[in-house]
Amino acid sequence: MGPFLALWQQRLSPRDLARRLWAHRRQTQTALFNWTVVLAGLIVLQGVTAVTSVFVARRVAPLEYGQYLSSLGLASLLIILPNFGLDTYLLSRGGLSAEQLSRLWARLLRLRAALLLAWLAGMGLLTLVLPADTYPFWVLWPTSLALALESLVLLSHSALRSLSRHGWVTLLQTAVTIALLGITIGLQLQPGQIALFGISRAGVWLLATPLTIVATARLLRRPGSGAVPAEAPSSVSATAFLISDIAAAIYTRAPVTVVALYLGAGDVAAFGPANNLVLFLFVIPNALYFVVLPLLSRLAHDRRSAFRRVAGLQLVLQGGAGAIVSLTTLLFGGAIITRLFGANYAGSVVSLLLLSPLPLLKSLNFACAAILTADDRQTWRTATQVVCAVFNVAASVLLARTLGLLGVAVALVASEALLLVGYALGALWPRPAAPQAVAA
């Protein structure tokens, strides 16, 4: 029986829920502490990255900054292919012992390195056919190299998160982020030096990547690093995670692209800041997802009652946090936009109000996604994401032509609601039979 159905049948009152949280206060306190640690790391990462971007924008010529953003956008989209969904796949292996996880991480790291080498060669060849004014080789390729090295680091982070070593991930994450900011400030960039920034950024990742890999290998081998009984083998192929990442990228990036193509740069200025702020707020449910998914994976196969309990409690936590963020966005979003971007972006206030339901919907979707992935239902999750990605693009194009920005916002909220319906149906569906084989 699905965890949603179990929760509904119990029909817990707020008082009963409070009693249950108190009865498991140690586990709840640990989860909340880990949530805070992960959230702090993600906020530092996003915040310092934004500061670095602003610093570069003010130092180099607008054309150069546009070249960098164009190169970063293209490379960030295409790197989904060599990443092959392995980060979430590894994160969902929380039921493995530390020794098993270490072997799996090493194998996946070699696979990703090989895929990234081929991808980097392809990106080099791609510069021969792309317009040089927009994608110069000495901007696109170093940017791609930095993302490739970062990809290896992120896979290592997933291995550590699978053993709930979130503090180490936050520490490593913060160290690299501050190093990137420091080298950017130290360069004292001038117009004409955007390539220097890209090469220096790649250099920082070139130093950080082997250090992170060595640290991860030692932490995974450390006694008491979270060894647990091995989980039942998963029948879910990593290809499902790849398709999932592609679909998520589509319905995350499609709205701004549709606005740019059908409504023009002026409407992008009115929609983009609001959309970016909402995307930043997604770090809150994403942080809890990183904490909960490995835990649920450990419980899914041999402790079903505990799995249902933890699944239900994290659903309540995600829903509560999402409701607070959505309400705060609705009430204070206008003031936030005006303070951050200035009076010239007052048009973004309306867009932000229209998008204010998204934090709540996204929080519930992260909660449902953790349940589906941990319970070997990634295939259902991926199929739902693909349907929603197609719906998002089609609805955005159709409604943009008829309703303008209002239509794009409605399409974005509707696609997230559709995703929630699909996820909930998957969680309510009877659990599949025990898998028989592992697919990597």
Image: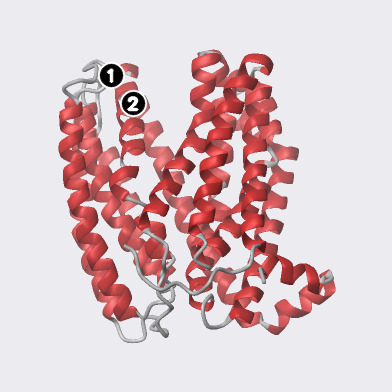
Point out which mark residue 134 bears.
Answer: 1
Residue drawn 53% across the image and 53% down it: 381
Q: Nearer the viewer, residue 319 or 176?
A: 319
Nearer the observer, 72 or 303: 303
Q: Amino acid at mark 2?
A: Ser
The part of the image, by quadrant, that contains residue 189 is top left
Quadrant of residue 36 within the rendered picture = bottom right
Q: Residue at x 61, y 20 (%)?
A: 398
Question: From the image, which quarter does the N terminus lie in?
Answer: bottom right
CA gap, disc 2 and disc 1? 7 Å
* Mark 2 / mark 1, whichever is N-terminal: 2
Task: Name above or below for residue 305 compared with residue 145.
Answer: below
Query: Which residue corresponds to mark 2?
Result: 70
The amino acid at mark 1 is: Thr
Measuring from the top left, give residue 10's x and y in whole percent. 80, 74
Q: Is residue 325 visible?
A: yes
The percent position of residue 28, horizontal first and vertical second, equals 62, 75
Q: Secondary structure under badge 1?
A: loop
Q: Is residue 212 visible?
A: no
Would you place residue 293 above or below residue 345 in this image?
below
- In front: 271, or 382? 382
Q: Residue at x 64, y 74 (%)?
A: 308
Rendered location of residue 26, percent (x, y): 61, 82
